[in-house]
Image: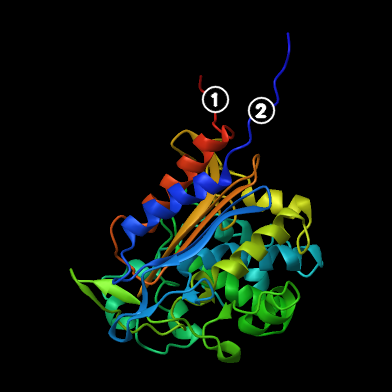
Amino acid sequence: MNLQTPTKPDHNALSTELDAYLRSIYPSHLTGAAVLVAKRDKVILQAAYGMAKMDEARPLSTDSVFRIGSLTKQFTAAAIMLLAQRGQLDVQDELHTHLPDFPALGQGIRLEHLLNHTAGLACYTDRPDFELLEPLDLSPVQVVALFQDTPLLFVPGSQFAYSNSGYFLLGLVIEKASGMSLAKFFSSQMFLPLGMRSTGMEGYAGLSPLQGYTEEPDPQLAPVISMSIPFASGALVSSIGDMYLWEQHMARSTLLSKESWQQMCAPTRLLSGELCGYGYGLENRQVHGISVVDHDGGISGYSSYSARTLDSGLFVLLLSNNDSGQPSTIEVGEWLVQKVTERGGACVDTSAA
């Protein structure tokens, strides 16, 4: 039998197809998104669509800086892993080891439970009065007070329940273990050493995002939110270029060891033995039959989505300055994952076949 060399995808044709789709989704006169698609260190598409500031007809650019919402969680998790590598903490540490003033109901909660959302903490952003709290510059003590006395939803480690409360606490753990503010730790220990100069806590070192919008149903300026509220669960800003740098550094184990990176991406085993797809700030799931590690983000004025297929090196990223556009950044990102995979002929999960 003669084996034929597999045909390589025509990235020019593929780029054109992706670009045409994205132009249809993000018209030039409305809010839009910056998008990056890469595979095996080759950028297939890097472009921006739509307006950065509608009243000035200023278009988005690939250098635009966005709030990334819950994409922040992978960076918070990476900071914990970096401190673990340095011997300054362990993911199996009990929460009270680092935050002894947290109420007694936190007994049995380990850092790992916060990382994979199995701590059972009530999520403070689900409070019915949360919209009233968003614009307030609350102290960490005041934010923790919003959830610290609420009974746990379940025994730590027994179930999964997505909770921004856990990641808020992880930010405080990072500060306690490192002796630095979270903003300084991110900047000095992670972002600047990696060359990520457009990434950081909003407001730190002058970093600020472009204007964000919400649709009600027409685009309106997004409501004000104080970054003291999301903190380690969602207060980072970044650009598509910096996020791709991060992806490359993680793939090459520049900052974290290969073992740490794999631990972040691994699914969680609950006390029952059942597997849960969420790892540390990242989630394992199927997108049109394709195995991905992904996450989305949503915060006042912005939405985001990133996905990676670790076996084929596909990376898809969208950062949008609209928190409620349709289709969502998740839906657009999933379409991109499917289309590039179809054209590349790789990464389809056949384990159920």
In this rendering, would 144 be left or right of 216? right
Residue 3's tag is none
Task: Quote the CA–CA distance across marks 2 and 1.
Answer: 19 Å
Percent position (x, y) of residue 287?
46, 40
Q: Is residue 188 above or below residue 88?
A: below
Q: Residue at x 36, y 67 (%)?
A: 32
Residue that carries the numbered disc 2 in the rendered image: 6
Residue 108 visible: no
Residue 207 rendering spot, x and y as whole percentages? 55, 86
In the displayed structure, 95 sits above or below 340; it is below
Can you say which quadrant of the picture contains the N terminus?
top right
The answer to whether one can see residue 171 in this image is yes
Number of on-image labels: 2
**SS of the residue under disc 1:** loop
Q: Based on the displayed image, in which of its 4 quarters is residue 191 positioned?
A: bottom right
Disc 1 packing (10 Å; few <14; some 14–19; many ≥20):
few
* Three-letter code for the amino acid on which mark 1 is drawn: Thr
330 is higher (above) or lower (below) than 107: above
Residue, x 34% and y 62% (percent of image)?
Answer: 26
Q: Residues within 10 Å of mark 2 (few under 14, many from 20)?
A: few
Q: Is residue 216 left or right of residue 308?
A: left
Q: Along the line of sight, which residue is nearer the eye, 114 or 64?
A: 64
Give how far across and how far down residue 295 sits, in percent.
49, 55
Coloring applied to the structure: rainbow
- Compared across the picture, whether 45 is left or right of 136 comes to right
The residue most toward the top is: 1
User: Which residue, given by chain and number where applicable, does mark 1 sit on?
Assistant: 350
Look at 54% across and 72% down and name the residue there. 239
Q: Give the mark, 2 or 1, whose residue is nearer the N terminus.
A: 2
The location of residue 33, given as percent across then percent down, is: 41, 66
